[in-house]
Image (spheres, coloured by chain):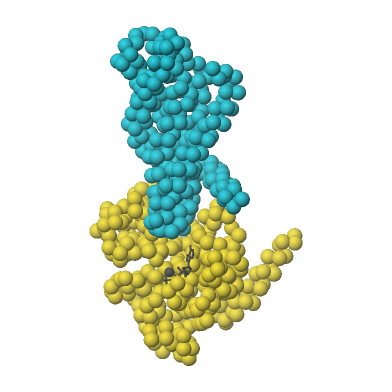
Chain colours: A yellow, B cyan
């Protein structure tokens, strides 16, 4: 009885903290679950030995939103992503996934949560004893899905990242960019509702990088996927926060510039500095800021 | 004090690993094919070195003890002396040491490089428990294969002893075989199988633990590989003593 009341108050607090916008409220009427953010960090602290990595980080990723995380190299971005997956535990603070407090979840409880999250590792982290096919199929094989179905899905995913030819290769026969793309395909298999991209475009040529951004935009606008997108490249930020994907009359996916229309794009930027969030908001505000640290970051000098 | 604390901590970690791997066996998915693959790798792969070890150990035992036996006119006990020492002690311990050198190092190197290349993290992120997918099949395969390897080493040891006895000391084959047949007891045989069961558990859990707790890049992989071989060998030898005591008192074996 007691705990039930507690839960209600927690939900109530969440609603207040969320700073609801009018559109959110309208959505909320028919889809109450939309109010609960996909990912929420509440005052998260983490140190390695004496090294403070996160020092009171709070942010939320709403459903269907892409959060771009910017910050200096070594600033704790990959660490943040690892916290979302429960690969690390914070020293203090809370992490919520779909409103579920996962902070104190055991490894076994975490397995259920991880089923709905896809992760693209910064270094690829492919299983080097498995072929490209088996790497991409990993999750499906673990779930014991029928092999013909697995094959269709793997081919579809590899086509998506333009790597159908590499299907029988081993990871050590691939270039760095190819490995990254296999990692992306592996993360997307099984259509997770939350996806972590850890510098997915680093070391890729501009057209391929653009393809990956388009992929992220498509997932955001057409599949309602929530994601965290860590990157160092301002070009990516530009794509993610100025274009949106729709389907035209012919059923093709097209990308439109935001233009003069109402701000439709569901992407926000979070900037880390010395373990703290120093900026959180839309791209326009980010560009307009006077903060010398951010300016330096945007211009690179 | 610090060393003791570290040791106890390590012991706790290893125990947790064994428990996690054990309870993982009762949940699906189960990794049968992976277990079979490990058995092949561990069992069939280690057969040649274990057989060689057994053969020459049996041979050298006779070489060293025969003159003494002859002095006391106990030549007809040669077979018994080889068989009991091999089946009770040398077979299980030497096989365990060879396997810990060959397999324990391979396990911790493999798991260690998976840790440093983030493959273990990737596995967890994809919803697989490494304790069940990687640790349990290896421990089970070791616990299953090490007793079999030990039996094979025992047989080769006794054969090796026989060949040296007849070849070098021209002892009659029949007298050797008779002495082996009447010299060993059922208790010896059971003890000789129980020991490698435990040794398999020790080698598997120590090397998996060392591999999974690797830190510090490729240098770290080297370090944990060395540590796993050293630690599992030492633990095997220490455990052997207490296990022998326990088996002797359970089966009421006189130490003569
Ligand atoms: N396992 C660990 N043990 C100790 N320190 C660590 C560990 N993992 C990360 N760190 C430290 O945490 C800090 C943040 O690392 P993180 O990988 O999150 O950076 P990042 O923001 O992703 O950087 P980059 O943009 O270069 O990828 C670094 O200073 C790193 O040295
Ligand atoms: Mg990083």
> Can see residue A17?
yes
In the rendered structure, the answer to whether residue A175 lies left or right of residue A44 reads left
Extreme-front residue of the structure: B71
Q: Position of residue A51 (x, y in %)?
A: 53, 70
Q: Which quadrant does the C terminus of chain B fall into?
A: top right
Q: Position of residue B125 (x, y in %)?
A: 46, 58
Q: Position of residue B188 (x, y in %)?
A: 50, 20
> Can see residue A145?
no
Quadrant observed for ligand 2 in the rendered image:
bottom left
Rendered residue at 34%/15% (across/down): B165
Q: Position of residue B30 (x, y in %)?
A: 47, 42
Query: Where A91 sits versus A210, above or below?
Result: above
Please tell me how many numbered marks the rendered image carries: 0
Along the line of sight, the residue nearer the viewer: A269 or B231? B231
Q: Quadrant of residue B250?
A: top right
Query: Where B218 sits versus B25, above or below?
Result: below
Rendered residue at 38%/86% (across/down): A301
Rendered residue at 34%/64% (across/down): A180
Rendered residue at 56%/25% (across/down): B247
Along the line of sight, the residue nearer the viewer: B186 or B82? B82
Extreme-right residue of the structure: A2
Along the line of sight, the residue nearer the viewer: B76 or A265? B76
């Amino acid at each position: 009885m007691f705990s039930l009341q507690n839960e209600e108050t927690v939900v109530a607090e969440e609603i207040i903290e969320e700073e609801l916008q009018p559109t959110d409220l309208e959505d909320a009427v028919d889809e109450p679950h939309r109010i609960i953010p996909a990912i929420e960090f509440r005052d998260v602290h983490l140190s390695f030995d004496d090294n403070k990595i996160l020092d009171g980080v709070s942010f939320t990723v709403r459903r269907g939103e892409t959060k771009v995380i910017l910050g200096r190299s070594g600033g704790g971005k990959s660490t943040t992503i690892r916290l979302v997956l429960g690969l690390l535990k914070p020293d203090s603070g809370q992490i919520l996934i779909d409103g579920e407090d996962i902070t104190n979840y055991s490894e076994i409880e975490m397995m259920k949560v991880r089923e709905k999250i896809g992760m693209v590792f910064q270094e690829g982290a492919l299983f080097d004893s498995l072929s490209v096919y088996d790497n991409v199929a990993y999750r499906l094989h673990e779930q014991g899905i029928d092999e013909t179905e697995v094959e269709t899905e793997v081919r579809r995913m590899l086509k998506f990242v333009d790597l159908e030819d590499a299907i029988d290769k081993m990871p050590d026969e691939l270039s760095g960019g190819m490995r990254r793309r296999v990692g992306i395909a592996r993360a997307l298999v099984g259509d997770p509702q939350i996806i972590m991209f850890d510098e997915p475009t680093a070391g890729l040529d501009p057209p391929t990088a653009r393809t990956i951004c388009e992929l992220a935009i498509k997932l955001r606008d057409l599949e309602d996927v929530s994601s965290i997108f860590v990157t160092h490249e301002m070009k990516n930020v530009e794509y993610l926060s100025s274009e949106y994907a729709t389907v035209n009359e012919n059923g093709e996916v097209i990308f439109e510039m935001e233009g003069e229309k109402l701000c439709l794009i569901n992407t926000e930027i979070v900037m880390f500095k010395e373990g703290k969030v120093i900026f959180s908001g839309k791209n326009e505000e980010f560009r307009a800021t006077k903060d010398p640290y951010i300016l330096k970051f945007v211009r690179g000098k | 004090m610090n060393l003791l604390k570290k040791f106890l901590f390590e012991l706790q970690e290893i125990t947790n690993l064994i428990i996690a791997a054990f309870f993982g066996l009762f949940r699906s998915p189960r990794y049968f094919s992976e277990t079979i693959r490990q058995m092949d790798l561990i069992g069939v792969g280690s057969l040649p070195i274990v057989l060689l070890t057994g053969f020459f150990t049996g041979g050298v035992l006779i070489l060293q003890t025969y003159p003494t036996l002859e002095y006391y006119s106990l030549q007809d006990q040669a077979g018994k002396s080889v068989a009991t020492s091999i089946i009770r002690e040398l077979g299980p311990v030497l096989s365990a040491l060879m396997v810990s050198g060959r397999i324990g190092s391979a396990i911790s190197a493999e798991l260690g490089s998976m840790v440093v290349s983030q493959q273990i993290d990737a596995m967890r992120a994809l919803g697989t428990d490494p304790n069940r997918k990687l640790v349990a099949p290896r421990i089970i395969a070791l616990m299953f294969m090490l007793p079999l390897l030990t039996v094979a080493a025992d047989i080769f040891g006794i054969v090796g002893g026989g060949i040296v006895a007849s070849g070098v000391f021209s002892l009659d084959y029949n007298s050797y075989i008779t002495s082996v047949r009447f010299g060993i007891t059922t208790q010896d045989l059971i003890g000789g199988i129980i020991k490698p069961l435990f040794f398999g558990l020790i080698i598997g859990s120590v090397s998996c633990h060392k591999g999974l707790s690797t830190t510090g890049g490729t240098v770290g992989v080297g370090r944990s590989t060395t540590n796993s071989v050293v630690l599992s060998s030492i633990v095997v030898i220490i455990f052997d003593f207490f296990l022998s005591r326990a088996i002797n008192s359970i089966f009421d074996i006189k130490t003569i």
